[in-house]
Image (cartoon, rainbow, N blue to C red):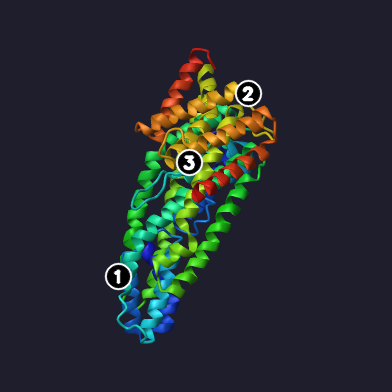
């Protein structure tokens, strides 16, 4: 264990906890330019840690699964940013060389199990930050200074929450990945198969939230166009997707006019 | 927390409009009251509030009930913004980027950022000024930006792309490749059927976490039996 957590590894974990904490601010507290979305934060973490391939796979899969988990009203959605960064960091730091499919699958599973913990931490910080608006009210003279201070405090609490969670859960995940390599071969094969099935689940989650029917007409149209153009006519994939978008757009126009 | 952000944004205007410290402080306190809406469309309420505060300070509309106007705009704009930005534009950008990744374009995450932010920053800036111009008329906002129509279009295009991706998904592997080979007809239909099964399970009340855990058990079972 001592050789696993050498100075290089400890510095990498501290660095990713800092970067992850800063990226996490984009999720709720500052900017909201979507750098925190898994499809961006996963590859970014992978690039920093030298395994962009794992970051792309983890980011894409988690994006599909959580993209429609919407913060409506007071509902606190799953922290997909934390899941993407944490899973990528564990996969990259827990493997020698590029992470294999079984490690990627296992890391996604680990961060999925962590979702209730991260949601609870998020709820606590949000409730604490909601009380910050009372602070400037108490100050009769320096209202503006109070607001600025309260803002910085709120940002700091959000950062601290992510930073602490990364410091605890990334090393724990790395240890778990080491354990995975000792397990029987069928578990590793199962994990590798799991990760290849996940995008289908992600697509199903999106389709079930965007449409009220199981077999939506547009879903079926997209599938049919892709099968005909891609599988039967062997058209390049980019052309297949452009065709799907064009047909979808024409059908909407036709429906609106009708 | 949004009330803090709102007060922070409007503070320079209030400072200019109300040189009297007592009046300035009472207006700041008003804007520190509870405020919660969709963060991007908060710009519209901010623009409208600046206009109303300006009219009030200049004596053009001294009885404007700014608190009431803010409260009445919060909920509908929250619902509209959630449905448009989180429920339509973001999934569309994400699915388009995913489709690009499947075609081997490794810079698809950057495309996601450009597509989403081009649309959202433009709207965010535009509704701020439009809120100021029309003093916070939500009907005018809906007419000008056609949020509902655009949300429907984004959702339909997203669904079409999901169908298209489902046809090539069985050939996907965790190794990022510049060219994904297309699956045969049988695999494409098998993938689609499996996706429909997932949709049925989700409709029966399954949550993403529960389905993921169930999927792990099935995959481990298949690996144990030597099927995969």
Q: Which is nearer the eye, A90 or B215?
A: B215
Determine contact: label 2, label 1, CB under 8 Å. no
Tell me the residue at 54%/61% (across/down): B121
Say which mark, if any, is on residue A133.
Answer: none
The disc, 2 or 1, on the residue closer to the chain's N-terminal end is 1
Could one spot residue A51 in this view of the protein?
Answer: no
Taking the image as shown, residue A21 lies to the left or right of residue B71, namely right
Q: Which chain letter goes with mark 2?
A: B
Quadrant in which residue B73 is drawn:
bottom left
Tell me the residue at 49%/37% (across/down): A217
Q: Secondary structure at mark 3?
A: helix
Q: Residues within 10 Å of mark 2 (few under 14, many from 20)?
A: some
Q: x, y percentage for residue B178?
A: 69, 36
Taking the image as shown, residue A37 lies to the left or right of residue B108, namely left
The reply to the same-chain question for discs 2 and 1 is yes
Residue placed under numbered mark 3 in the picture: A83
The vertical placement of B160 against B133, above or below, is above
Q: Secondary structure at mark 1?
A: helix
Q: CA distance from mark 2 to mark 1?
A: 61 Å
Residue placed under numbered mark 1 in the picture: B68
Q: x, y percentage for residue A209?
A: 42, 40
Q: Secondary structure at mark 2?
A: loop
Q: Which is nearer the eye, A160 or A137?
A: A137
Tell me the residue at 45%/66% (across/down): B43
Residue placed under numbered mark 2 in the picture: B184
**Disc number lying in front (2 or 1):** 2
For the view shown, which residue lies furthest in the front direction? A258
For the view shown, which residue lies furthest in the top direction? B225
Q: CA distance from mark 2 to mark 3?
A: 34 Å
**Disc number lying in front (1 or 3):** 1
Tell me the residue at 43%/67% (across/down): B140
């Amino acid at each position: 264990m001592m050789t696993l957590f050498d100075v290089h590894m400890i510095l990498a974990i501290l660095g990713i906890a800092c970067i992850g904490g800063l990226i996490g601010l984009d999720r709720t507290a500052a900017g909201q330019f979507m750098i925190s979305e898994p499809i961006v934060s996963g590859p970014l973490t992978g690039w920093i840690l030298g395994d962009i391939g794992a970051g792309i796979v983890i980011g894409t899969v988690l994006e599909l699964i959580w993209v429609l988990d919407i913060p409506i009203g007071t509902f606190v959605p799953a922290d997909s940013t934390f899941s993407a960064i944490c899973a990528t960091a564990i996969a990259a730091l827990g493997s020698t060389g590029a992470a294999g499919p079984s490690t990627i699958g296992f890391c996604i599973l680990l961060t999925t199990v962590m979702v209730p913990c991260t949601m609870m931490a998020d709820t606590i910080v949000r409730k604490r930050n909601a009380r910050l608006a009372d602070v400037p009210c108490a100050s009769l003279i320096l209202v503006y200074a109070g607001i600025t201070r309260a803002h910085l405090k709120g940002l700091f609490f959000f950062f601290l929450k992510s930073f602490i969670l990364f410091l605890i859960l990334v090393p724990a995940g790395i240890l778990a990945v080491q354990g995975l390599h000792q397990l029987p071969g069928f578990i590793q094969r199962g994990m590798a198969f799991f990760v290849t099935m996940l995008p289908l689940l992600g697509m199903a989650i999106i389709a079930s939230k965007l449409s009220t029917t199981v077999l939506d007409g547009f879903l079926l149209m997209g599938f049919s166009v892709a099968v005909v153009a891609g599988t039967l006519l062997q058209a390049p994939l980019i052309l297949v997707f452009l065709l799907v978008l064009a047909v979808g757009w024409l059908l909407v126009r036709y429906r609106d006019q009708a | 927390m949004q009330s803090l952000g709102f007060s922070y944004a409007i503070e320079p205007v209030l400072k200019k409009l109300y040189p009297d410290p007592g009046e300035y402080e009472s207006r700041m306190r008003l804007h520190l009251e509870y405020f919660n809406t969709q963060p991007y469309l908060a710009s519209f309420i901010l623009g409208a509030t600046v206009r109303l505060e300006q009219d009030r300070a200049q004596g053009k509309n001294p009885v404007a009930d700014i608190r009431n106007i803010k409260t009445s705009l919060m909920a509908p704009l929250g619902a509209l913004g959630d449905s448009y930005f989180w429920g339509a534009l973001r999934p569309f950008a994400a699915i388009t980027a995913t489709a690009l990744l499947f075609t081997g374009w490794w810079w698809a995450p950057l495309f996601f950022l450009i597509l989403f932010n081009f649309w959202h920053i433009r709207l965010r800036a535009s509704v701020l000024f439009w809120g100021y111009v029309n003093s916070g008329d939500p009907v005018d906002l809906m007419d000008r930006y056609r949020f509902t129509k655009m949300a429907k279009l984004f959702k339909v295009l997203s669904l079409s792309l999901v169908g298209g991706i489902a046809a090539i998904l069985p050939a996907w592997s965790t190794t990022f490749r510049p060219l994904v080979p297309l699956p045969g007809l049988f695999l494409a239909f098998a993938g689609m059927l499996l996706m429909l099964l997932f949709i049925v399970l989700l409709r029966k009340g399954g949550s993403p976490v529960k389905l993921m855990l169930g999927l792990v058990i099935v995959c481990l079972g298949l690996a144990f039996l030597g099927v995969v």
